[in-house]
Image (cartoon, helix red, strand yellow):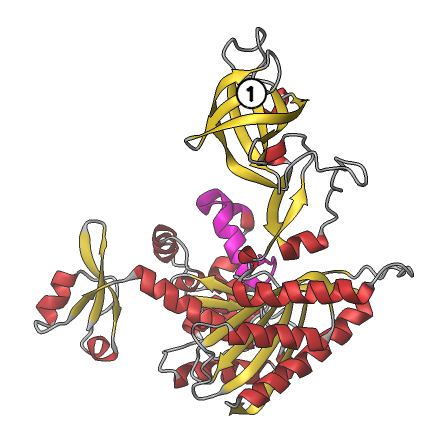
């Protein structure tokens, strides 16, 4: 079996299985030539999206070794294991462990460990299993063929015609000569492979601020052990946060299954927290709300808890007239509801810097509102005074047909929702000019009136436009009603 793809308007082989390789089929050859050599050849069209998804799944699984994982398309991964090798018994042991674990999942894997990404890639392809001490990259790759640098095929062919077949032979030439003939990019890649310069790699995921993990000698499957492990990790993370005087705002629990499947669960909090009991309770709520339950399969051999975002914990002095416990309970309730139902479903109102009624308030996630110093609500009435504005406004003001009105004053009779209303009491106007600096077109000034009809219904109506100034035929609307 071979995998094919259309390259330069021709179907070419991009991958072969073991039997095809034994029959001298190689990637890069035309499919027609392959069929001529092996008539009963099974050819499957390449699925680049599926290949990319599989590579990303393998990268997720490799997070168990280090959170600093980058993808090297089409078939490679970079793992920056700086500071993590001692957890696995050294560099050679870590490399062997990773390759053996992937091989057990029926992947054909080759790996190498070096001080630079380019050197590690070259050794993984042409000297798999090699572990190079830091600073010895030039010696380790000197005997490798020039193709190990993964250069442009034209440049590789030019080196071969010049009799330069190994990386060591190319490295022996002067940099001015190589730059003049092949460009600065080729020289930069060569120096990176030799360890003379380092090119940073970009991890797939943002590195967490804090992290704690628990590795199991044998995979665990019981819910009680998983919950106790999460609580233990939360306490470890709490100690780290307490040392820095910070609290977590976003946390993620990662469950690594023995068969390679990785599950991630995230929670957010309205206020920075480092209380292990609260963190464990929120993850319990998250697990209970899953539509696809957390299936341990053959068991989890690693559970990691990460603080994706940590902030300074404001430890203010509590006054005697402030109920701190009540505020914390409300914040915890918001976090629980947001964790179970979704942050976008638990909302609160926030005041806006505007005097336009429909824009005076906006709904934001309650967790976000709890941590942001919101603008104070303006006081629109004095104590023991009736409300000047209704508590409920219509999403869109509803037009009314005014049949009689006081000149430049409130309406006397109007029709709204097919019902004729006669006004018995009226207050106003409250004049509100539109914010011209926020709109490209001029908007009419509004005159608001509080009116009450003969049935006792109290409405908040406004006239859109002034008589004889902005419009000769102002329109009337109902914007809300009073309780």
Vertically, is 293 above or below 316?
A: below
Quickly name the residue at label 1: 412
Please tell me which residue is depicted at 49% across the width and 12% down the height of the picture: 473
Please tell me which residue is depicted at 48% across the width and 72% down the height of the picture: 290
Query: Residues in magenta?
Result: 176-201
Q: Look at the numbered disc 1 and give the secondary structure of its residue.
A: strand
User: Is residue 40 covered in magenta?
Assistant: no
> Farthest residue toward the right?
320
Crowd rating for badge 1 (residues with CA inside 10 Å; few <14, some 14–19, many 20+): some
**Of 430 and 80, which appears nearest the observer?**
430
Please tell me which residue is depicted at 64% across the width and 27% down the height of the picture: 425
Q: Position of residue 133 (x, y in %)?
A: 61, 75
Snapshot quadrant of residue 211: bottom right
In the image, 419: left or right of 192? Answer: left
User: Is residue 181 covered in magenta?
Assistant: yes
**Of 45 and 421, which appears nearest the observer?**
421
Quarter of the rendering occupied by the C terminus: top right
Vertically, is 218 above or below 195?
A: below
Q: Main secondary structure of the magenta part?
A: helix
In the image, 45: left or right of 333? Answer: left
**Of 264 and 454, which appears nearest the observer?**
454
Please give the count of numbered marks on the rendered protein: 1
Quarter of the rendering occupied by the N terminus: bottom left
Please tell me which residue is depicted at 52% across the width and 80% down the height of the picture: 95
């Amino acid at each position: 079996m071979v995998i094919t793809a259309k390259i330069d308007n021709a179907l070419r082989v991009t991958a072969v299985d073991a039997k095809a390789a034994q029959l001298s089929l190689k990637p890069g050859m035309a499919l027609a030539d392959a069929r001529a050599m092996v008539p009963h050849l099974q050819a499957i069209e390449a699925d680049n999206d599926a290949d990319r998804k599989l590579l990303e799944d393998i990268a997720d699984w490799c997070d168990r070794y280090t959170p600093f994982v980058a993808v090297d398309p089409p078939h490679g991964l970079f793992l920056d294991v700086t500071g993590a090798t001692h957890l696995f018994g050294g560099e050679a042991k870590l490399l062997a462990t990773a390759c053996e674990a992937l091989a057990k999942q029926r992947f054909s894997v080759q790996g190498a460990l070096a001080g630079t990404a380019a050197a590690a890639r070259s050794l993984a392809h042409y000297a798999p299993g090699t572990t190079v001490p830091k600073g010895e990259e030039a010696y380790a790759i000197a005997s490798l063929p020039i193709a190990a640098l993964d250069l442009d095929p034209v440049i590789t062919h030019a080196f071969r015609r010049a009799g330069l077949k190994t990386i060591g032979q190319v490295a022996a030439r002067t940099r001015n000569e190589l730059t003049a003939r092949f460009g600065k990019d080729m020289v930069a890649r060569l120096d990176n492979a030799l360890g003379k310069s380092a090119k940073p790699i970009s991890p797939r995921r943002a590195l967490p601020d804090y992290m704690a993990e628990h590795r199991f000698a044998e995979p665990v499957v019981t819910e009680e052990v998983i919950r106790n492990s999460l609580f233990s990790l939360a306490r470890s993370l709490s100690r780290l946060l307490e040392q820095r005087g910070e609290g977590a705002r976003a946390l993620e629990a990662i469950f690594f299954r023995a068969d390679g499947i990785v599950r991630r669960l995230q929670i957010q909090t309205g206020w920075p927290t480092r209380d292990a009991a609260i963190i464990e309770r929120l993850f319990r709520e998250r697990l209970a709300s899953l539509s696809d339950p957390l299936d341990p399969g053959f068991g989890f051999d690693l559970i990691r808890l990460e603080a994706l975002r940590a902030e300074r914990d404001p430890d203010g002095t509590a006054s005697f007239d402030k109920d701190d416990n009540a505020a914390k309970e409300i914040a915890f309730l918001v976090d629980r509801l947001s964790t179970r139902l979704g942050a976008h479903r638990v909302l609160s109102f926030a005041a806006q810097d505007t005097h336009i009624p429909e824009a005076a308030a906006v709904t934001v996630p309650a967790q976000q509102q709890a941590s942001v110093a919101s603008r104070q609500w303006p006081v629109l009435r004095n104590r023991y005074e009736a409300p000047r504005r209704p508590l409920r406004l219509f999403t869109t003001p509803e037009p009314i047909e005014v049949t009689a009105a006081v000149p430049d004053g409130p309406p006397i009779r109007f029709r709204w929702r097919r019902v004729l209303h006669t006004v018995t009491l009226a207050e106003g106007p409250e004049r509100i000019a539109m914010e011209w600096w926020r709109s490209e077109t001029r908007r009419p000034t509004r005159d608001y009136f509080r009116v009450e009809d003969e049935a006792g219904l109290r409405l908040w109506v406004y006239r859109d436009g002034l008589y004889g100034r902005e419009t000769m035929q102002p329109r009337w609307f109902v914007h809300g009603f009073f309780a």
